[in-house]
Amino acid sequence: MIQMMKNRALKNRENEFMKNLFSFFLLVLMFSITASEEIYAEPFFRDYGITFGLVSSNIESDFFINHRSKNGVSLSLSAESKKIMFFYISAEVNYIQKGILDTYILFNPMTYEILGMEELKHRLDYISIPVHIKIYRENDFISPYILFGPRFDYLFNYRSDVYD
């Protein structure tokens, strides 16, 4: 009887070992199939960039006597696609600061007497999103290209001494 119990315990251990071994091989097989069938998706945009620049803008009108350009900043995030046949697609998101300093004459409306001059500051903040198609010709020495496409501008902030 004791021998039968020992044999049964040994068989249970062998069965348990075989179950664990079978589970291990199934797990390894499942991960190897998953790894071999993994799909590698390439990103559409390949080249990325950040640019920073200075902007000088000017606006003219007949009302003001002196116009001076106001300097601002430009910050851009850009991305360019991989080559599609003979062209690329590039997209940017730009923050652009523009503005002007205007000088005008203050006068008394009753007597038209000149009271002095006043300077006004105007500041315009834009978000600009250009999407371009870049037709590209590669050569050994120079690589000319043509760039065209739409641009969407949104004025999200306007500050002026007149309206503040």
Image (tube, rainbow, N blue to C red):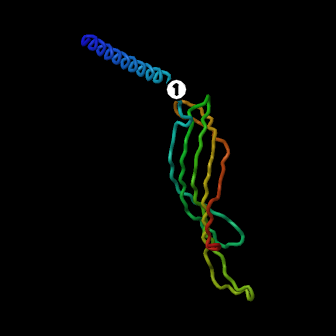
Local crowd size for mark 1, using a 10 Å CA cut-off: few (<14), some (14–19), many (≥20): few
142 sits left or right of 59 in the view: left
Residue at (67, 85) in percent of width and height: 114
- Where does the image place residue 45, in percent across and percent down from the top left? 55, 37
Please identify the quarter of the rendering in which residue 107 is found. Answer: bottom right
Looking at the rendered structure, the kind of residue marked 1 is: Ile
Q: Nearer the viewer, residue 144 or 121?
A: 121
Which quadrant, please, contains the C terminus? bottom right
Name the residue nearer the viewer: 30 or 110. 30
Q: In this view, does 86 lie above or below 53?
A: above
Q: From the viewer's perspective, tell me whether residue 108 is left or right of residue 101.
A: right
* Secondary-structure class at tag 1: loop
**Figure quadrant of the N terminus:** top left
Residue 53 sits above or below residue 100 on the image? above
Q: Residue furthest bottom?
A: 111
Q: Residue at x 63, y 35 (%)?
A: 135
Residue 2 lies, in percent from the top left, at: 24, 13
Picture layout, residue 78 above or below residue 17 = below
1 w.r.t. 114: above or below? above
Q: Position of residue 31 (x, y in %)?
A: 44, 23
Instruction: Residue lying at the far right in this picture: please name it.
Output: 110
Question: What is the residue that sits farthest to the left in this orientation?
Answer: 2
User: Hey, which quadrant is residue 133 in on the image?
Assistant: top right
Numbered label tally? 1
Residue occupying the point 53% across, 31% down: 42
Residue identified by numbered label 1: 39
